[in-house]
Image (spheres, helix red, strand yellow):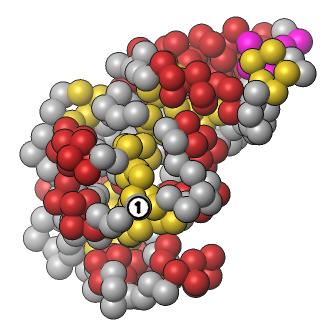
């Protein structure tokens, strides 16, 4: 049996009866940038996250960059970032002219911790970006407490954590700003690139709205050197429909994750560790294997598609060659890059496909 990593067409097919009339209505409206449909989704998503404001932007990277700018990160500042994350977390810092300072994660959850942030603190640090990696939420109360002690602004990278909770509170309203990607493969995914920021700080919200629209509140009057990063109504309309099923689809992911955790517990693998107060949304189910590449090849031969998130740590990318960082300085990030492997998981993975994944992993591990 062939098991795809993620079936986006099946996701669309489930919603097509609602989505297609709504999208056609949006296309016929004659309004294609921002507007009422974007404002509706922004209000819905802010309420879902428990935040006062949501601001739609063009993509997740823009969300991070604009949020950093909105909280006051400027060229030359230092920003603490996870050493193991998608490179966009680092790129957003660099695009502000700031300097990424890596924080090694907890190997079990793959997330940075309050203790790790304190240990990595350096002079000149202005902010920290906790990443809710793989849909596993960080300890936000603990991180906010440490950030207060160290006078750090907190901007969350929640690109993989739509609906995740810590101690019963949804991610999206703990910090100065939480940044979201609505890339199609995310738990809350659009039909193309899209992103957003949630915040309960009215000053941050106003600043992001200004920055996303050429630095302009009034047409042809530009207060700052802003950007063009705006969510369009077609994407917003589809995201509103997807938001209505997000909790149900996350619950489907959780049931698959529970099956994996139970069935693979005695295999020679490192399985995901869920913190006591965390409610993950299982954007990814990431295991670790000492001989990852050969293991992935054996699974592929049995029809199971896997992916690696992420095979090259940010510090080892050519883009950061001048940082002077190496694997010896960041051994956890280096080891994770060698060992992590993502198994198929998604709201449309059939029970027999889950069985096939479990059988293949148990046989080949």
Residue marked by disc 1: 124
Query: Relative to the observer, which residue lies in front, 321 or 294?
Result: 321
Image location of residue 273, percent across then percent down? 17, 58
- In the rendered image, which quarter is residue 55 located in? top right
Which element carries disc 1, helix, strand or loop? loop
Image quarter in which the C terminus is found: bottom left
Image location of residue 257, percent across then percent down? 26, 49
Image location of residue 39, percent across then percent down? 63, 13
The answer to whether residue 280 is left or right of residue 125 is: left
Q: Is residue 292 above or below residue 285?
A: below
Neighbours of disc 1 within 10 Å: few (<14), some (14-19), many (20+) = few
Q: Is residue 33 magenta?
A: yes
Farthest-out residue, front:
123
Query: Relative to the observer, which residue lies in front, 208 or 271?
Result: 208
Query: Relative to the observer, which residue lies in front, 340 or 75?
Result: 75
Q: Residue at x 60, y 11 (%)?
A: 40
Q: Is residue 236 above or below residue 31?
A: below
Q: Is residue 13 above or below residue 29?
A: below
The answer to whether residue 21 is left or right of residue 317 is: right
Magenta residues, dominant SS class: loop
Q: Is residue 75 magenta?
A: no
- In the rendered image, which quarter is residue 224 located in? top right
The range drawn in magenta is 30-35
The answer to whether residue 332 is left or right of residue 277 is: right
Residue 72 visible in the picture: yes
How many marks on residues? 1
Q: Residue at x 21, y 60 (%)?
A: 118
Image location of residue 356, percent across then percent down? 35, 61
Q: Residue at x 59, y 47 (%)?
A: 65
Residue 10 visible in the picture: no
Q: Residue at x 31, y 32 (%)?
A: 174
């Amino acid at each position: 049996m062939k098991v795809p990593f993620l079936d986006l067409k099946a996701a669309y097919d489930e919603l097509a009866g609602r989505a297609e009339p709504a999208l056609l209505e949006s296309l016929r409206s004659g309004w294609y940038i921002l507007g009422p449909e974007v404002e509706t989704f922004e209000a819905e998503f802010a309420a879902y996250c428990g935040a006062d404001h949501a601001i739609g932007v063009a993509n997740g990277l823009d969300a991070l960059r604009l949020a950093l700018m909105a909280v006051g990160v400027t060229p030359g500042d230092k920003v603490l970032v996870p050493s193991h994350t998608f490179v966009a977390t680092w790129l957003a810092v660099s695009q502000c002219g700031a300097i990424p300072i890596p924080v090694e994660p907890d190997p079990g959850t793959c997330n940075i911790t309050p203790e790790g942030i304190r240990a990595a603190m350096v002079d000149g640090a202005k902010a920290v970006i906790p990443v809710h990696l793989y849909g596993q939420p960080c300890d936000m109360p603990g991180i906010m407490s440490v950030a207060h002690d160290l006078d750090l602004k907190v901007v969350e990278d929640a690109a993989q954590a739509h609906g995740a909770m810590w101690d019963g509170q949804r991610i999206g309203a703990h910090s100065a700003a939480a940044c979201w990607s609505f890339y199609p493969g995310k738990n809350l995914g659009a039909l193309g690139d899209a992103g957003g920021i949630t915040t309960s700080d009215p000053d941050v919200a106003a600043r992001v709205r200004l920055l996303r629209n050429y630095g302009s509140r009034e047409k042809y009057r530009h207060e700052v050197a802003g950007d063009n990063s705006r969510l369009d109504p077609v994407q917003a309309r589809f995201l509103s429909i997807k938001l209505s099923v997000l909790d149900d689809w996350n619950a489907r992911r959780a049931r698959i994750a529970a099956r994996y955790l139970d069935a693979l517990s005695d295999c020679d693998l490192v399985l995901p560790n869920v913190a006591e107060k965390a409610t993950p949304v299982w954007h990814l189910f990431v295991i670790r294997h000492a001989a990852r590449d050969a293991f992935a090849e054996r699974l592929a031969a049995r029809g199971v598609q896997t992916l690696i998130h992420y095979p090259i740590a940010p510090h080892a990318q050519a883009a950061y060659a001048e940082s002077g960082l190496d694997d010896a300085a960041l051994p956890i990030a280096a080891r994770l890059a060698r060992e992590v492997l993502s198994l198929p998981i998604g709201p449309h993975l059939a029970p027999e496909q889950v069985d096939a994944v479990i059988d293949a992993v148990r046989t080949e591990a």
